[in-house]
Amino acid sequence: MTGPHGVGIGWRPEIAGFVADLPGLRFVEVVAESLAPTGPLPPGLAELRGRGVTVVPHGVRLSLGGAEPVDPARVAHLAGVAELVGAPLVSEHIAFVRAGGLEAGHLLPLPRSRAAVAAVVANVQRAQAELPVPLALEPIAALFDWPDDELDEADFLTAILDATGASLLLDVANVYANARNRGADPLALLDRLPLDRVAYAHVAGGAERDGHYHDTHTDPVPSQVLDLLRGVCGRHRPPALLLERDGRWPPAAALRAELDALAAASGFPVVT
C-alpha cells in the first residue's frame, strides 16, 4: 500500500462537491473524529474512495503530548477509521488537548523538555501498538514558548521521531507562523529537520492579528508560505502536499488557484 502522492486537499462536507470535481486529485485528508469507525462513509467521501483517491485520517483529539496515557478508546477509533477508509497511514499532532479530565478544545503546545519528549514517545508507542498503519506526527503552530524549554524545536522533534520511528507531517504554514512569531528564520529549522522522513506536508493560510501571525486555515495561503514551500521542495520534496481550508470558503476559482499554486511551487501535476 502506497502513501499519499501529489497535491491533495482536506475533505470537508462543505466543499465535497468542489473536491469531487477535481479530475487529477490523488488524495484527501479527513478529520478522523468526524467519521464513525463502523461507517457508513459520507457519500462524497465514499465516491472518492470508489475512484481510487487515497484518504488519510487526521486525528485532533488523541492528546499525544499529555502527561496521562493516551485514551485507548480514542486510539481504537482512529484505528477503526483507518481500516474503514483503507488508509495507508494516519496522522496526529505533537500537542495536548486535555489534562486532569479537562478539555481545552484546542491543540496546545508542549514545553520542549526531555520529560515532554518521554511523555510523547510513550503515548506514540502506545498508539502505534494498536494502529493498523504507520503514524505521522505533526508539530503545531504555537503563539508562545514555555519558559522551561530545554531543547530547540529541531532537537525536540528529531528526538521524538528517532525514538518512535514515526514519520513527520510537516506543516509548512506552521513552520512559517512559528518562525515569524519568534523572529526566527524558518529555513534554519528546515535545514535541521529530517526532511527525508516527511510523509506529506500541509499548506494553509493565516492572518496577522494583534502583533501575532495566526495559522487560521480560513485565509488565503500567503506568498511567504508558498516561498517557504519552494524552499522545502528545493531541499527534499515531500511525497505529497495538502491544502488545508476549514472555513470562510472562497469561490471555487480561488480554491482552484490555491491548489494550482501548490502544484507550481512543488512541480507536482495540477489536480484542477
Image (cartoon, helix red, strand yellow):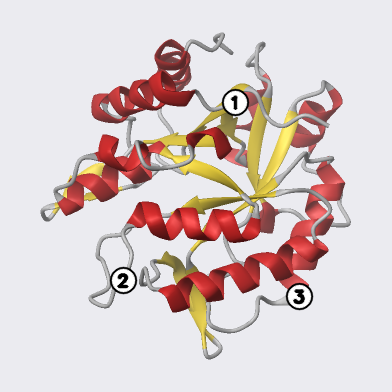
Q: Judge whether 236 appears above or below 71 on screen.
A: above
As shown in the figure, which amino acid type bears the numbered disc 2? Glu
Q: Secondary structure at mark 2?
A: loop
Quarter of the image for residue 198 reads top right
Q: Judge whether 41 appears above or below 265 on screen.
A: below
User: Which residue is depicted at the point 79% across and 64% down?
Assistant: 129
Q: Label 3 to label 1, Cα distance in Å?
A: 30 Å
Q: How many labels, in total?
A: 3
Q: Quadrant of the C terminus?
A: top right
**Which residue position holds label 1?**
239
**Which residue position holds label 3?**
72
User: Which residue is depicted at the point 27% across and 50% down?
Assistant: 178
Quarter of the image for residue 147 reads bottom left
Residue 246 picture location, percent across and down: 47, 43
Q: Residues within 10 Å of mark 3 (few under 14, many from 20)?
A: few
| Dot in front, 1 or 2 | 2
Q: Residues within 10 Å of mark 1 (few under 14, many from 20)?
A: some
Q: Quadrant of the N terminus?
A: top right
As shown in the figure, which amino acid type bears the numbered disc 1? Pro
**Which residue position holds label 2?**
150
Q: Is 29 left, or right, of 54 in this rendering? A: left
Q: Residues within 10 Å of mark 2 (few under 14, many from 20)?
A: some
Do labels 2 and 3 touch, CB within 8 Å? no
Q: Is 183 left, or right, of 79 in this rendering? A: left
Q: Label 1 to label 2, Cα distance in Å?
A: 32 Å
Q: Judge whether 118 appears above or below 198 on screen.
A: below
**Mark with earlier residue (3, 1):** 3
User: Which residue is depicted at the point 53% across and 74% down?
Assistant: 118
Between residue 198 and residue 87, name the one nearer to us: 198
Q: Secondary structure at mark 1?
A: loop
Q: Secondary structure at mark 3?
A: helix
The circle drawn on residue 88 is: none
